[in-house]
Image: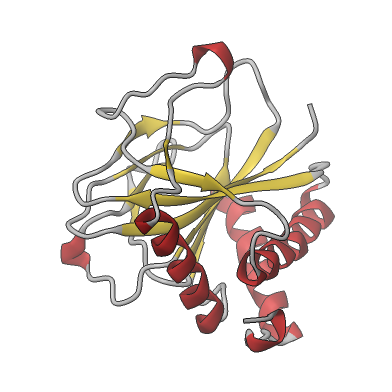
C-alpha cells in the first residue's frame, strides 16, 4: 500500500484540529481530540503494530534512561518498537502528519521544537504503566507528549484509559479509541495507563528540543 491509498484530510479539518489542540494545551495543559487520523491510516498502523507483536519484533519497555534504565514490568508493562522514516508507507504518512502539528505548535507557542520521536506501544491484557511524568530530571529535551490510539471498537468496559492528573483539578480518563489523540506538557502532566482486558495499541511520541 502506498501513500496515495490513504485518505487525506482536507486543509480545513486539519486547521480546526490544530487550533483545538493548541487552545486546549494553552488553557489546560492537555488536549483530547477525536478523528485525528484518517480511518484507513489508523487501520494500517494498527495492522502494522499487531504484525510486529505477532512476529516478536517488539521490545519490553524500560523505565528511566541511560545507565539508570531498567526493566520493571510491575511499573511498566508495554512492548515497543521505535518508528523510523521509511519503515512503511503508513509510518511515513503518520510522521508527515505529525510534522504539520509540530509546525503549528511552534507557530503558536514558540517552543523551538526541532524533532518528533515516536514508537508503537503494545499493552497486552492486564499490562499498565504506573504514574509518571515524561520528562527526565536530567534531560529537558521532551516538551510535548503525544499519544495516538489505534484500537477499533473500544468500549469503556475494556478499560485501558490514559489517566491524566492535571494539577489542582482531579483526574481525567481518556479511553484509547481509534483515531483519538491526547497531547500534554511533558514536564508537568502526571499520568498513568490503566490495565485493559484486551490488547491496547497506540503510537506514543514526543516533540523535542535538541539537547
Q: Say which quadrant the C terminus sits in.
A: top right
Point 81% across, 52% down: residue: 106
**Count of numbered circles on the image:** 0
Point 46% across, 77% down: residue: 43
Point 68% across, 26% down: residue: 140
Q: Nearer the viewer, residue 175 or 117?
A: 117
The residue positioned farthest toward the top in the image shown: 67
Within the image, what quadrant is residue 3 found in? Answer: bottom right
Question: On the rendered structure, is 33 left or right of 88?
Answer: left
Within the image, what quadrant is residue 19 found in? Answer: bottom right
Relative to 45, say whether 123 is above or below.
above
Residue 21 image offset from top left, x and y in percent: 61, 62
Q: Say which quadrant the N terminus sits in.
A: bottom right
Within the image, what quadrant is residue 72 found in? Answer: top left
Residue 60 image offset from top left, x and y in percent: 39, 36
Residue 125 image offset from top left, x and y in percent: 21, 51
Relative to 190, say whether 99 is above or below.
below
Amino acid at each position: 500500500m502506498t501513500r496515495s491509498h490513504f485518505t487525506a484530510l482536507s486543509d480545513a479539518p486539519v486547521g480546526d484540529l490544530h487550533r483545538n489542540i493548541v487552545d486546549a494545551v494553552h488553557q489546560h495543559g492537555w488536549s483530547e481530540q477525536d478523528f485525528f487520523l484518517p480511518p484507513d491510516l489508523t487501520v494500517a498502523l494498527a495492522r502494522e503494530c499487531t504484525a510486529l507483536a505477532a512476529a516478536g519484533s517488539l521490545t519490553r519497555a524500560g523505565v528511566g534512561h541511560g545507565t539508570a534504565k531498567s526493566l520493571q514490568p510491575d511499573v511498566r508493562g508495554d512492548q515497543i518498537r521505535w518508528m523510523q522514516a521509511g519503515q512503511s508507507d503508513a509510518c511515513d504518512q503518520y510522521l508527515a502528519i505529525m510534522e504539520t502539528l509540530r509546525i503549528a505548535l511552534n507557530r503558536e507557542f514558540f517552543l523551538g521544537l526541532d524533532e518528533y520521536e515516536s514508537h508503537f506501544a503494545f499493552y497486552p491484557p492486564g499490562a499498565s504503566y504506573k504514574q509518571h511524568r515524561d520528562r527526565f530530571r536530567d534531560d529537558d529535551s521532551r516538551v510535548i507528549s503525544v499519544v495516538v490510539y489505534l484500537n477499533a471498537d473500544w468500549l469503556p468496559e475494556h478499560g485501558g484509559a490514559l489517566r491524566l492528573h492535571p494539577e489542582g483539578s482531579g483526574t481525567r480518563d481518556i479511553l484509547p479509541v481509534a483515531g483519538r489523540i491526547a497531547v500534554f506538557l511533558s514536564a508537568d502532566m502526571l499520568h498513568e495507563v490503566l490495565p485493559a482486558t484486551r490488547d491496547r495499541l497506540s503510537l506514543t511520541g514526543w516533540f523535542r528540543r535538541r539537547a
